[in-house]
Amino acid sequence: MTHDTSVSIHPYFKVSEGNLDKVRPLLEQCVAITSQEPKCQYYGFSLNGHEVFCREAYEGAEGLIEHLASIGPTLRQLLDLAEIARLEVHGVETELAKLRGPLAALNPTYYVLEYGFHR
């Protein structure tokens, strides 16, 4: 059982050949934008060749929805150069239920958090 209402989203992007140098400034923009979001708990990008992973979590579903609104234009630019290879969303069911409609077009896999804590 958990009382943790944080929501984490785990997007894996596959960058098109030859576009990594164009993607890097967009990642920096994403970090700059997201650093101003009060409900963001952590945010960053890890790279493995042409695969980019975004490590991010928010205070509840509302924090994630607010993030997607603020990052929207930059994310659209990123998706012109990369595709989402895999997308996971983790959280308690009450928070995930709030995301199923808004994230439906992205077709994520949802993982229900059942045990744990958040400090």
Image: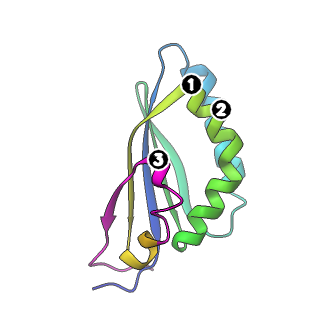
Q: Disc 2, disc 1: CB below 8 Å? A: yes
Would you say residue 70 sits in the magenta stretch?
no
Q: Disc 3, disc 1: CB below 8 Å? A: no
Which three-letter amino acid code belongs to the residue tagged 3?
Leu
**Quarter of the figure that contains the C terminus:** bottom left
**Quarter of the figure that contains the N terminus:** bottom left
Residue 103 location in percent, x, y? Answer: 49, 55
Q: Is residue 46 above or below residue 113?
A: above
Which three-letter amino acid code belongs to the residue tagged 2?
Gln
Question: Which residue is rendered at x = 64% and y = 37% of the image?
Answer: 76
Q: Name which of mark 3 and mark 2 comes first in the sequence.
A: 2
Q: Is residue 5 above or below residue 66?
A: below
3 or 66, nearer to the observer: 66
Residue picked out by circle 2: 77
Q: Secondary structure at mark 3?
A: helix
Q: Name which of mark 3 and mark 1 comes first in the sequence.
A: 1
Residue 106 numbered mark, or none: 3
Q: Which residues are magenta?
A: 98-119
Name the image quarter holding residue 69: bottom right
Residue picked out by circle 1: 81
**Number of numbered discs on residues:** 3
Which three-letter amino acid code belongs to the residue tagged 1?
Leu
Q: Nearer the viewer, mark 3 or mark 1?
A: 3
Q: Is residue 114 above or below residue 40?
A: below
Q: CA distance from mark 3 to mark 1?
A: 17 Å
Q: Secondary structure at mark 2?
A: helix
Q: CA distance from mark 2 to mark 1?
A: 7 Å
Confirm whether residue 22 shows in the render: yes
Q: CA distance from mark 3 to mark 2?
A: 16 Å
Q: Is residue 12 above or below residue 104?
A: above
